[in-house]
Amino acid sequence: MPVAIITGFLGAGKTTLLNELLSRNQDADILIIENEAGDINIDGSLLEKANKNNVFELSSGCICCSLNAELGHLLSSIIRSNVKYDYVLVEATGMADPGEVIRTFTGAYIQRFFKLDAVIGLVDAGLILGQIDAFVEIRRQLAQSDIVLINKTDLITTDKAKDIEHQIHTINPFARIEKTMYGNVQEIEVLHSGVFDPSKIEKSISGFSNLTIADPENKSRHDIKALSFTIPGDFKMDSFSWWLDSFIFYNANNILRIKGILSLENMQHKIVLQSVGNNYQVLQGTAWQEEEVRASRLVFIGSNLDQKELEKNLLQLRAENKEKKMV
């Protein structure tokens, strides 16, 4: 069952977006998981047309604080019931870091029944530039979003919209940014977007290698940044896997996303790496072409990351190195 997680700061427009998605998919059987203490207010008329059993509220208030209890029990009960939904929408509270919610849906057992389709982040166009430095929650929401909707764009100028896009890409260069008014996503691919498809990830990484991630000013302003590396040659699969497990374990609170194309020794295909929080997937990409220079491209998004140390470790993991220092 495909899952979209809707995140965004207080007042960004999550309620409006959810109502919009429901109104445009009234024939679909959609499961909604939301917070009893949240600010959501689903249109009464929509609820009347839907099966009310499709709406679940977590009574403990903040969804990110109740994952090991209510959300876990809820998902388990859905699995045991054998009920199938066309789509699952999860609304995280405005002050929540969506990372814990994301990690729940990327666990090995849960992935047998649920498939994370996208993390959708919303920002208030009129307020975001004043909020982004003040609230780490917003920066973490943006860093973990696959699609970012700049809502209420009717309230800002074109130049301000460009500034907002730049700020978002400083934190998350992979985010697909769309502009909306009143949460209207009629012309925007939101559900079933396929952002976790390996071909799309490979394409985004390939096109990312020549981008400038952030200027010095923005690196000093934000604790969250994106670090990009191009490592020539091949990695040894066992050595890289061991290092990656260790790196994610020791940086569980710092690393938000990892995306990459790996060149592994004795493998004819590119390997697509996708990490959300402390869970990662490796999938087969396209074949290496004879004229293509083999190199791995990796992007790490997180806080308190040491760029020089990361590059040093990645270079030491190359197959031609006889001695490798693992950190």
Image: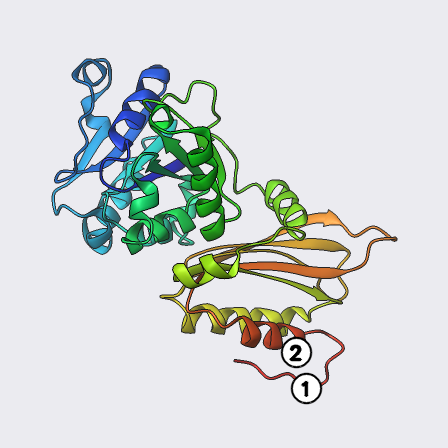
Seen in the picture, residue 177 relative to 108 is either above or below; the reply is above
Q: Residue furthest right?
A: 291
Give yes or no for contact between labels 2 and 1 (Cβ–Cβ under 8 Å).
yes
Q: Position of residue 195 (x, y in %)?
A: 52, 39
Snapshot quadrant of residue 321: bottom right
Q: Name the residue rendered at 20%, 54% in the picture.
A: 65
Q: Nearer the viewer, mark 2 or mark 1?
A: 2
Numbered circle sitting on residue 323: 1
Q: Position of residue 2 (x, y in %)?
A: 42, 35
Q: Position of residue 158 (x, y in %)?
A: 46, 29
Disc 2 residue type (three-letter): Gln
Q: Name the residue rendered at 23%, 48% in the picture.
A: 95
Q: Nearer the viewer, residue 123 or 192?
A: 123
Q: Name the residue rendered at 35%, 53% in the picture.
A: 140
Q: Nearer the viewer, residue 65 or 171?
A: 171
Q: Is residue 50 left or right of residue 120?
A: left
Q: Name the residue rendered at 50%, 32% in the picture.
A: 193
Seen in the picture, residue 109 relative to 308 is either above or below; the reply is above
Q: Secondary structure at mark 2?
A: helix
Disc 1 residue type (three-letter): Glu
Answer whether residue 1 is visible to the viewer in this image: no
